[in-house]
Image: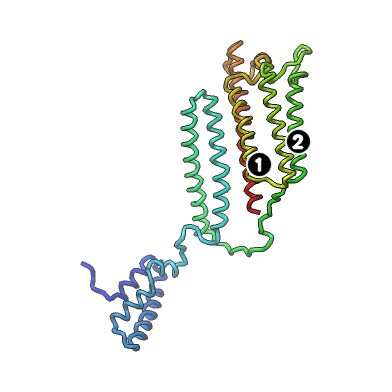
């Protein structure tokens, strides 16, 4: 059976029970005095004692909150001192860590000859796990810091202001794009005519010669379109949604045939794969002669080129839309 006590006694008991034993007596005495004074002040103004006591205790609020104030114990997970640092770090980690984990799992599954469904399933699972773990452990670390390492708040200064992005497409950006495209086109022609690899004094193309003329001509046309896009962006002075759409279309038009040729084994010259298998057979663990060696080399080369191609295309698309978004905001 509960003991019949006054509201004041019940309130004080609820407040001090979570405090250290050494502080309970002092807090009890302080609360008894302050509550009694507040109640007497209301009674002198004509309020009934019971109503005055009820009103005073209501104004004091939740005993748990009051006790946390006496104990200097935060009632939030992450307070203002660390919140912005936690939020910025969490966003940065969620941009980087899940993508890196998905990339690693994808490579591993491809090299295991897993099906597309198995690969996608593994990637989705690892992304969810990484997001949950990054969010939990980052928050836990800052919650511990909030309660164990209180530090003075640093004074804000103008040096912390973020940089303003340059939204106008510069001359150097156009020149850089032109140089890259010209060098890439020259490399393709050099590979076909002179070869980066020579065996017995003869050129050994890396790209499959059977891709000429149609596939390679289409690639050179796409590269010319990229060059024209770079010039158009410079003449307009900035990126916009139209340029971003054209950039996306050109990137996809390059990626889809390239990945198709890689997946079907038509992109890399079979004689070049024979050269790799013959001259680096010791590097292929458990490899058999002939077709087995070539198949192992083709698998590795296809995975590496496929991942690099997809990564470059995705970044090119994202970069175009980011530039268009920055230009629009300005």
**Relative to 5, residue 155 above or below:** above
| Label 1 crowd bin: few (<14), some (14–19), many (20+), radius 10 Å | many
Q: Residue, x 77% and y 11% (percent of image)? A: 200
Query: Residue 67 appears at what percent x and percent y?
Result: 41, 68
Quarter assignment of residue 191:
top right
Q: Where, quadrant-wise, is the N terminus in this rendering? A: bottom left
Classify mark 1: helix, strand or loop.
helix
- Distance from disc 1 to disc 2, alpha carbons, whole Å, reads 17 Å
Q: Horizontal placement of 327 versus 202: left or right? A: left
Q: Residue, x 67% and y 14% (percent of image)? A: 271
Quarter assignment of residue 26:
bottom left
Q: Horizontal placement of 236 versus 152: left or right? A: right
**Relative to 240, residue 76 above or below:** below
Classify mark 2: helix, strand or loop.
helix
Q: Residue, x 77% and y 18% (percent of image)? A: 193
Residue position for label 2: 178
Label of residue 300 in the image: none
The mark closer to the camera, 1 or 2, is 1
**Relative to 198, residue 128 above or below:** below
Query: Residue 185 appears at what percent x and percent y?
Result: 74, 28
Q: Residue, x 39% and y 80% (percent of image)? A: 34
Camera-nearest residue between 247 and 232: 232
Query: Residue 59 appears at what percent x and percent y?
Result: 38, 75
Label of residue 243 in the image: 1
């Amino acid at each position: 059976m509960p003991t019949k006590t006054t509201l004041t006694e019940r309130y004080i008991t609820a407040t001090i029970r979570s405090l250290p034993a050494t502080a309970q007596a002092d807090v009890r005495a302080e609360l008894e005095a302050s509550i009694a004074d507040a109640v007497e002040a209301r009674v002198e103004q004509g309020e009934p004692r019971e109503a005055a006591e009820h009103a005073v205790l209501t104004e004091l609020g939740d005993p748990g909150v009051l006790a946390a104030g006496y104990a200097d114990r935060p009632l939030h997970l992450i307070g203002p001192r660390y919140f912005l640092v936690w939020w910025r770090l969490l966003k940065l980690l969620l941009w980087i860590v899940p993508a890196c984990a998905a990339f690693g799992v994808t490579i591993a599954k491809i090299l295991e000859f897993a099906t597309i469904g198995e690969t996608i399933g593994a990637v989705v699972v690892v992304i969810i796990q990484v997001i949950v773990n990054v969010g939990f452990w980052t928050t836990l670390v800052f919650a511990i810091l909030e309660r164990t390492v209180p530090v003075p708040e640093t004074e804000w200064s103008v040096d912390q202001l973020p940089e303003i992005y340059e939204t106008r497409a510069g001359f150097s950006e156009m020149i850089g794009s032109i140089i890259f495209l010209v060098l890439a086109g020259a490399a393709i022609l050099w590979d076909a005519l002179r070869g980066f690899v020579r065996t017995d004094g003869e050129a050994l193309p890396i790209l499959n010669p059977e891709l000429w003329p149609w596939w390679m001509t289409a690639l050179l046309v796409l590269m010319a379109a990229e060059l024209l896009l770079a010039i158009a962006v410079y003449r307009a002075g900035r990126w916009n949604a139209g340029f971003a759409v054209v950039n996306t279309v050109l990137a996809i038009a390059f990626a889809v045939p390239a990945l198709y040729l890689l997946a079907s084994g038509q992109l890399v010259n079979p004689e070049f794969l024979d050269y790799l298998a013959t001259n680096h057979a010791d590097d292929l663990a458990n490899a058999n002669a002939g077709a087995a060696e070539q198949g192992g080399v083709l698998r590795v080369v296809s995975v590496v080129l496929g991942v690099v191609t997809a990564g470059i295309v995705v970044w090119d698309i994202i970069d175009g839309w980011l530039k268009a978004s920055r230009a629009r905001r300005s």
